[in-house]
Image: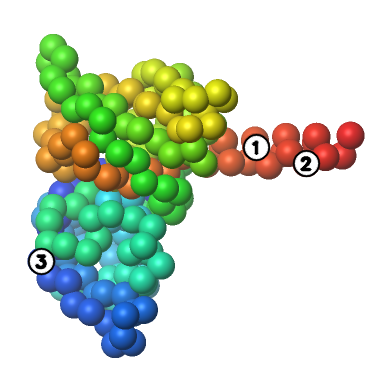
Amino acid sequence: MFTGIVAAVGKISSVEPLAGGDDAGVRLSIDAGGLALGDVALGDSIAINGACMTVVEKTDTRFCVDVSRESLNCTVGLDQMAQVNLEKALTLAERLGGHLVSGHVDGLGLVRKFEPVGESWELVIEAPQQLAKYLAFKGSIVVNGVSLTVNRVDDLGLAAADGCLCSINLIPHTIASTTLKNLHVGDRVNLEIDLIARYVERMLALSSSAR
């Protein structure tokens, strides 16, 4: 589990194909930046742009993860040398500064607007139909590993059947401390919806079917 509070911005320094042909994944070597790795062991989890990955190699300043082809197909930003948001797995001794995050990317969003508004920035993301129903005013969403608050939701069709536009305000600290400052209109982003919303939907569905 994670919180969506980015601990450091690192950089993918190499992308090496794994053995197995076209269906194989890649091994990423990541410069950890300001992320302290002294308490990280092989097999531990680190979220990379919101995707939970397992450490398979490490030094004091660098670590490696293997990313399956399935994960590559479901995410963006894990197949090229670029900056990435990093967060170590949550421990029970830490404050939950963001919200409960699983590190499982639910889908991809499309950046429709990214413009300064006063001292902050407005980020508008088009969320796909399968995720739109989980997004709500003042609810939580994870964008490339960053826990954010939804300021407005505009459905693109009846009952979000065609997806929705999700508006988010980014304060200067978030811009300075994450890779979100590098976004441009047309970019794809990793999205994870609120964990609690999934369980609420499941409970309501079972309740309805039992009537």
What residue does disc 2 label? 206
Give the image location of residue 79, x and y in percent.
22, 64
**Label 2 to label 3, Cα distance in Å?**
46 Å
207 to 117, vertically: above or below: below
**Label 1 to label 2, Cα distance in Å?**
9 Å
Residue at the limit of the structure toward the top, as seen here: 118
Left or right of 130 on screen, residue 126: left
| Amino acid type of the residue that numbered disc 3 sits on in the rendered structure | Ser
Q: Quadrant of the C terminus?
A: top right
What residue does disc 3 label? 13
14 to 3, vertically: above or below: below
Residue at 38% over, 26% down? 165
Residue at 83% over, 40% down? 209
Q: Which mark is residue 201?
A: 1
Residue at the limit of the structure toward the right, as seen here: 211
| Amino acid type of the residue that numbered disc 1 sits on in the rendered structure | Glu
